[in-house]
Image (cartoon, helix red, strand yellow):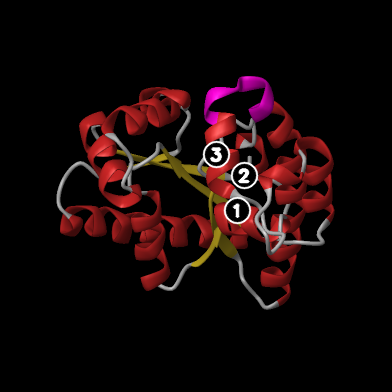
Amino acid sequence: MLLALAVLKIALTGGPGSGKSTVARMFRELGAEVLDADEVARAVVAPGTPAWEELRREFGPEFFLADGSLHRAKMADLVFRDAEARRRLNAILHPAITKELGRRLKKLAARGAALVIVEVPLLFEAGLEKKYDKIIVVTAEEAQQQERLSGRDRRPRGEAWGIIQAQWPLATKKAGADYVVDNRGSLAATRAQVKNLWQELQLLLDKESEKS
């Protein structure tokens, strides 16, 4: 049963380095409306926002740069090592992100969007899966994830491995998916899967439109 919303919400998730952003870009190229929860997370902690003020109270000014913006690298290092700090951070961020995503979804609906794909890296970890109508999980081999993280973020391989292990295993996420994009092969192979999936989502949207 789809959630009773004006917009069909499709969550796009996966593991670190599995290729979520690549798949999101492919959906955009096909004409999909795509929201990025990471971009929203950056927006909600802009200087002066309520979440920014809460973070300063909770963690102190040492986690902010001279221009007032959040010191992301320092915060990331803290929450990577400290589970309690990660819990405190998420308790501030998740409600703010959820609220802002809702605002942006309403804005897209007002413009006539009927289906929106939302890239949510920590969908399962944050317990957000029930807020979406369908879930897409992007998968890759762990060695590929590690290589991509090391190359993209210039992280030591050991640190990249730790980031992967800090999230739910891809096999577990895959079990909770409605659709899976296998990103172990070439970009062309991934693009073909995304194209087929986009067509399938359009058919799903048509069926739901007929019901209403």
Q: Label 3: few (<14), some or many (≥20) within 10 Å?
A: few
State the residue at coordinates (40%, 23%). 165
Q: Label 2: few (<14), some or many (≥20) within 10 Å?
A: some
The image quarter in which residue 65 lies = bottom right
Which tag, 2 or 1, sits closer to the chain's start? 1
Segment tinted magenta in the rendering: 80-86
Going by the numbered disc 3, the residue's amino acid type is Ala
Q: Viewer-nearest of labels 1 and 3? A: 3
Residue 112 percent across, percent down from the top left: 65, 76
The image quarter in which residue 5 lies = bottom right
Q: Label for residue 9?
A: 1
Using the numbered discs, state the Cα–Cα distance from disc 1 to disc 3 in whole angstroms.
Answer: 29 Å
Question: 10 above or below 29?
Answer: above
Q: Viewer-nearest of labels 2 and 3? A: 3
User: Is disc 3 placed on a helix, strand or loop?
Assistant: helix
Using the numbered discs, state the Cα–Cα distance from disc 2 to disc 1 in whole angstroms.
Answer: 5 Å
User: Is disc 1 placed on a helix, strand or loop?
Assistant: strand
Q: Which residue is mark 3?
A: 76
Tags 2 and 1 touching, CB below 8 Å? yes
Q: Label for residue 132?
A: 2
Which tag, 2 or 3, sits closer to the chain's start? 3
Q: Does the magenta run of residues contain 161? A: no
Tags 1 and 3 touching, CB below 8 Å? no
State the residue at coordinates (67%, 41%). 131
